[in-house]
Amino acid sequence: MGKIGIYGSSFDPITNVHLWTASTVAHRCRLDKIIFLPCSNKRKDKLMKTSDLHRWNMLELALKGNDKFLADDHEIKQEAWNVYTYYTLEHFKKKYPNDEIYFIMGADLLVDIAEGKWKYDQELISSNKFIVMAREGIDMLRTISRSPILRNHDDGSTFHLIDKGLAMEISSTYIRDEFSKGGEPRYLLPDACYEYIKKHSLYQ
């Protein structure tokens, strides 16, 4: 039995911090694979700057050469109304029935679940495992203990909290802003993605 982490994001564009974070999580949590799951630009809660195709192409360029990292277009291909994390994780559990599946997320999303902002939250928390990365100013243990839905479904293995050394904040937004304002974000993302953005005049 292997251990697989599902790492969802807009990846608009993918950055070196995304890659470093995934690598660190894989190492610390002894994951065999990490699946990078770009979300669709059809989603109502996301405002994408870039087409699915460009984001997918950059993702594939960024993951080349690392056999622990896989890209999966499952969410990109879904209808927007059907994209909920609960359904997504059910899909991957069926796809990899002999593996343990973990959903990788930031502590800010843990807060959103605690505040009742996610659909199918009971089903999601009761039937899945999560790797939660620290975010500045968020007390993860306190968030879990103060939320009935989180604390009542935590059997001690539901949440793997990573609270040291993963709060590097070089965001995709920062990189897009640098490109649009004539800045130079070259070493914040993989060289192949930097060249791709230049070639296709993205984020101008």
Image (tube, rainbow, N blue to C red):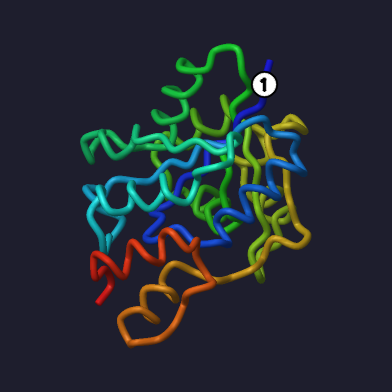
Relative to 114, 54 lies left or right: left
Q: Is residue 20 above or below residue 168?
A: above
Residue in the foreground of this view, choosing between 75 and 180:
180
Q: Position of residue 32 (x, y in %)?
A: 67, 30
View extreme (bottom): residue:
182
Question: What residue type is disc 1 on?
Answer: Gly
Q: Residues within 10 Å of mark 1 (few under 14, many from 20)?
A: few
The single residue placed furthest to the top in the displayed view is 98
Q: How many marks?
A: 1
28 is higher (above) or lower (below) than 20: above
Residue linked to disc 1: 2
Please tell me whether residue 96 is drawn above or below residue 169 in the rendered image: above
Q: Quadrant of residue 1?
A: top right
Front one among 171 and 145:
171
Secondary structure of residue under mark 1: loop
The residue positioned 50% from the left and 65% from the top of the image is 189
Query: Which residue is painted at 48% across and 74% down in the image?
Result: 186
Quarter in which the C terminus is drawn: bottom left
Q: Position of residue 23 (x, y in %)?
A: 66, 48
Q: Please state which of residues 177 and 138 is positioned toward the viewer in this rendering.
A: 177
Residue 119 place in picture, x, y as percent: 39, 39
Percent position of residue 49, x then y: 26, 64
Q: Nearer the viewer, residue 35 or 157?
A: 35
Q: Residue at x 35, y 46 (%)?
A: 39
